[in-house]
Image (cartoon, rainbow, N blue to C red):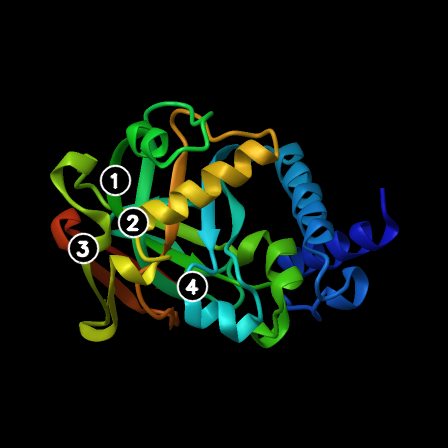
Amino acid sequence: MNRQVVAAADRLDRAAADGVPCAPVADLIGPTDVDAAYAVQSLLTARRLARGARIVGKKIGLTSEAVQRQIGVDRPDFGVLFDDMRFGNGSAVPLESLLQPKAEAEIAFVLGADITEDDPAAVRAAVDHAVAALEVVDSRIADWRIGITDTVADNASSGVFVLGDTPLRLAEFTPADVPMRMYRNGTLASEGDGRACLGDPLNALTWLARTAITLQAPLRRGDIVLSGALGPMVPVGDGDRFEAEIGPLGRVSATFSKKG
């Protein structure tokens, strides 16, 4: 395996284990080599699986045009969701495993069938239901000084996620039309709507499905897919309580704190 890919994975792995953010990895794999960045992500995924984690789905990042312009890219990216990243609605989420967390509200799709066709109708038909979600993005890279290869290598800057408990089928609502309001400690901190996510969260899901098929790793029945932020992300601090309202999908909340 490419020595630079291994070195980048080692740097990110060490930052996660030690709880100390590291320098960007673009110096090792370059600022534009996205394939190398995904190779780093794949190596880190293999290491996490070897430690006992289980994959439960994927997350889509960089779905906002403003964020894409900021980082200098013209497409989304994706990361892997593991079982130990998932928390239920209203959970107390420990901050010990997170370095620089930021919360965002979005729609999570749960698949009822494999997606093996690169077709929006097939993608829509494969969705069993959707729920409101809080995603806490995180970066192992100091001060969020990330470019596209840094965030891709770092599992699309994944942290943890919280799922709501009001499942709806796509016949019951229109993802692009949902309003979103997210509160931190009772104060409105972020707002937006479904169109903030590539114009429609289903567009993001279709992009991921197409990409997964190209990589010969299609999305499967039971996968959870976090489709992307519906508004600006907000820093998370010790003791913060976040609650998001996402139209008919209802509310999802979590409290974040350090032990002791």
How busy is the neighbourhood of tag 2: few (under 14 within 10 Å), some, or many (20 plus)? many
Identify the amino acid type marked 2.
Answer: Ile
State the residue position of label 4. 258
Q: Nearer the viewer, mark 4 or mark 3?
A: 3
> Which label is found at residue 177?
3
Measured in 3D between alpha carbons, the distance from the residue under mark 3 to the one under mark 1, in whole angstroms, is 14 Å
Nearer-N-terminus badge (4/3): 3
Q: Nearer the viewer, mark 3 or mark 1?
A: 3
**CB atoms at circles 2 and 1 under 8 Å apart?**
yes
Nearer-N-terminus badge (3/1): 1
State the residue position of label 2. 107
Q: Is residue 73 left or right of residue 122?
A: right
Measured in 3D between alpha carbons, the distance from the residue under mark 2 to the one under mark 4, in whole angstroms, is 27 Å
Nearer-N-terminus badge (2/3): 2
State the residue position of label 1. 130
- Closest to the observer: 229 or 144? 229
Identify the amino acid type marked 4.
Answer: Lys
